[in-house]
């Protein structure tokens, strides 16, 4: 698994994902549970959709 999520991308994913989770807990729509996916991909630094489309927001060494 090659890392493909950069630092700024990770921060935004975790922040937005957390807000969505809080929203659904407070009575928001069920689709807001997708925030858990954002948090997970931010924490593991890998996004399967990025891999499929060849997107990479992290810097590579070399």
Image: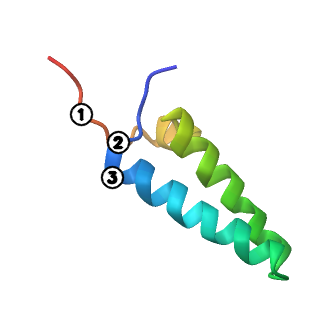
Label 1 neighbourhood size at 10 Å, few (<14), some (14-19), many (20+)?
few
Residue 60 on image: x %, y %: 23, 26
Q: Quadrant of residue 23?
A: bottom right
| Kind of element beneath mark 2 | loop
Structure colour scheme:
rainbow
Mark 2 or mark 1: whose residue is earlier in sequence: 2
Instruction: Name the disc covering residue 12, or none.
Output: none
Q: Which residue is mark 1?
A: 59
Label 3 to label 2: alpha-carbon separation: 6 Å
Location of residue 26 by image quarter? bottom right
Of 2 and 45, the residue lying toward us: 45
Q: For marks 3 and 1, give the one nearer the viewer.
A: 3
Where is mark 2, residue-wise? 6
**Sequence-wise first label, 3 or 1:** 3
For the point 40% across and 37% down, the residue is 54
Is residue 48 found left or right of 37 in the rendered image? left
> Residue 8 shows which numbered tag?
3
Q: Marks 2 and 1: CB-CB under 8 Å?
A: yes
């Amino acid at each position: 698994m090659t890392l493909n999520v950069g630092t700024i991308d990770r921060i935004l994913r975790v922040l937005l994902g957390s807000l969505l989770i809080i929203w659904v807990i407070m009575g928001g729509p069920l689709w807001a549970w997708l925030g858990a996916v954002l948090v997970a991909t931010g924490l593991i630094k890998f996004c399967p959709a990025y891999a499929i489309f060849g997107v990479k927001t992290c810097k590579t060494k070399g």
